[in-house]
Image: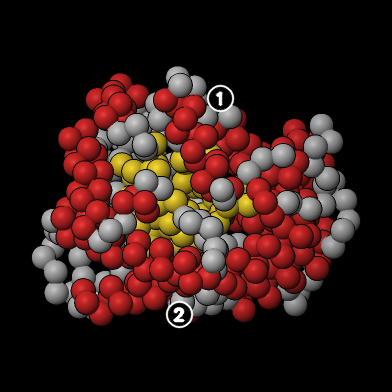
């Protein structure tokens, strides 16, 4: 049995027995986030679930330039450097479906989605989120649940064939027709609604039927999670925290689907008590991504100001200035997401909770700017007063000796603070 199957079967079994617990799904391809995640897992002797999204990593390279096989090699290389055991690593694919190609007719977009999920399954990803909820160019605006389920089953058939071909571990599946937008809401957060219990139960049933029609009953038996909306979301400057009383009926519907737990997307920036309440209520898989790179950006910008004090040099561009230049030169990843005046857009480019700046860190110019910053600081100990001034959220940890006051360790520490919140929430 794979680590994924064992881990998720255990979560569902504990829920049925009245116990609690869950796992955080780390959705990031940033090297420092991956390093921090694996170091955190090694320190706690815990399984680690890292997921790549369809836009980020796919058979065509995605915006990171990595195929699923390349992403696996990238994560495993970091596991080797951090001493994290590979038998505790679970790799997942998030929003696997036609989303990157939804501007194409459905048949063409689904062919590309099939090639993508084949690449994920063949590369040994063992948690596959089937997301065919989006309309393609020649679809109606809102797809019927039956169409979504049929397309998901088609992709599952491709994944099953890939695993049979390669002799790999059979994957577990996540399903769902009410799937939040990847990366946070694009609109005002004034009409958030919790998934209706009947809709969640119907989602499971229509997928069960669609899988069965293709002879995939054994595959459906490995479906372990349903994506629903528990009433949590974040936008550019707003956060809707989980309100358990609003999800009481949805939570009760889990009794009618004992095979499943709920998977909660967009849990970034939730208060610690809200994350713990989600897990207690059966939202056992908590997806997090932008919060991790937001925390990393906070630390990078703080270090940039520290470098201006400790190692100022006229040839080195301030990191916020460099990122502003880079984002203005290539506005495609933020322009349609950040409304308002030029000044409002400038603030959002750097400080929005949706963290669209994360799409720019892999660019050569951004990498050069970060490398120049870290080279300027080197391995020197950064004085506590400067940490207090520019990285105040890490000062107590530095004072307690839990974080070394060097640039690299402060970056890792900023991400680790978020990981600690999720560990506390999922280990009830």
Residue 80 sits above or below residue 139 on the image: above
Mark drawn on residue 60: 2
| Quadrant of res 420 | top right
* Number of residue marks: 2
Image quadrant containing the C terminus: top right
| Quadrant of res 365 | bottom right
| Sequence-wise first label, 1 or 2 | 2
**Residue placed at 77% from the left, 54% from the top?**
82
Q: Secondary structure at mark 1?
A: loop
The residue tagged 1 is 428
| Apparent side of residue 189 relative to residue 359 in the rendered image (left or right) | left
**Residue placed at 28% from the left, 58% from the top?**
215
Q: Secondary structure at mark 2?
A: loop
Residue 395 sits above or below residue 340 on the image: above
Q: Residue furthest left?
A: 140
Question: How many residues crowd mark 2 within 10 Å: few (<14), some (14–19), many (20+)?
Answer: some
Residue 203 sits above or below residue 12 on the image: below
Q: Residue 405 at what x, y percent from top left?
A: 82, 47
Mark drawn on residue 15: none
Camera-side residue: 344 or 226? 226
Res 87 visible: yes
| Quadrant of res 78 | bottom right
**Residue placed at 72% from the left, 37% from the top?**
44
Camera-side residue: 152 or 183? 152
**Residue placed at 40% from the left, 30% from the top?**
282
Res 308 visible: no
Residue 222 sits above or below residue 397 on the image: below
Q: Residue 160 at what x, y percent from top left?
A: 41, 63
Camera-side residue: 260 or 112? 260
Q: Real-space Cα distance between discs 1 and 2?
A: 40 Å
């Amino acid at each position: 049995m794979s680590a994924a199957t064992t881990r998720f079967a255990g979560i569902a079994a504990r829920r049925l027995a009245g116990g609690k617990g869950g796992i955080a799904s780390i959705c990031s391809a940033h090297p420092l986030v991956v390093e921090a995640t694996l170091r955190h897992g090694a320190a706690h002797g815990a399984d680690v679930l890292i997921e790549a999204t369809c836009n980020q990593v796919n058979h065509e390279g995605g915006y990171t330039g990595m195929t699923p096989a390349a992403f696996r090699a990238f994560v495993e290389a970091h596991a080797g450097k951090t001493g994290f055991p590979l038998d505790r690593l679970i790799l997942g694919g998030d929003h696997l479906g036609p989303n990157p190609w939804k501007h194409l007719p459905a048949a063409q977009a689904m062919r590309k989605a099939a090639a993508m999920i084949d690449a994920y399954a063949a590369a040994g990803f063992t948690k596959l989120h089937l997301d065919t909820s989006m309309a393609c160019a020649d679809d109606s605006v809102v797809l019927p649940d039956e169409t979504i389920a049929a397309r998901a089953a088609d992709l599952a058939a491709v994944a099953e064939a890939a695993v049979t071909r390669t002799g790999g571990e059979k994957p577990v599946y996540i399903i769902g027709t009410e799937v939040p937008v990847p990366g946070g809401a694009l609109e005002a957060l004034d009409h958030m609604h919790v998934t209706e219990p009947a809709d969640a139960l119907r989602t499971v049933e229509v997928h069960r039927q669609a899988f069965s029609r293709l002879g995939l009953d054994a595959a459906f038996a490995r479906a372990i999670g349903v994506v629903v909306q528990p009433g949590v979301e974040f936008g550019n400057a707003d956060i809707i925290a989980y309100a358990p009383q609003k999800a009481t009926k949805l939570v009760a519907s889990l009794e009618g689907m004992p095979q499943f737990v709920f998977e909660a997307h967009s849990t970034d920036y939730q208060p610690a008590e809200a994350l713990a309440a989600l897990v207690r209520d059966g939202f056992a898989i908590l997806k997090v991504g932008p919060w991790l790179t937001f925390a990393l950006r906070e630390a990078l910008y703080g270090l940039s100001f520290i470098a201006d004090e400790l190692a100022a040099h006229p040839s080195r561009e301030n990191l916020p200035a460099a990122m502003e230049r880079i984002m203005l030169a290539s506005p495609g990843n933020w322009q349609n997401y950040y409304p308002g005046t030029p000044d409002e857009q400038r603030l959002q480019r750097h400080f929005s909770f949706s963290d669209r700046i994360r799409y720019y860190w892999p660019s050569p110019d951004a990498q050069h700017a970060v490398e120049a910053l870290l080279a300027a600081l080197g391995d020197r100990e950064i004085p506590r007063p400067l940490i207090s001034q520019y990285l105040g959220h890490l000062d107590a940890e530095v004072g307690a000796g839990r974080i070394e006051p060097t640039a690299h360790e402060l970056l890792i520490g900023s991400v680790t603070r978020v990981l600690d919140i999720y560990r506390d929430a999922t280990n009830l």
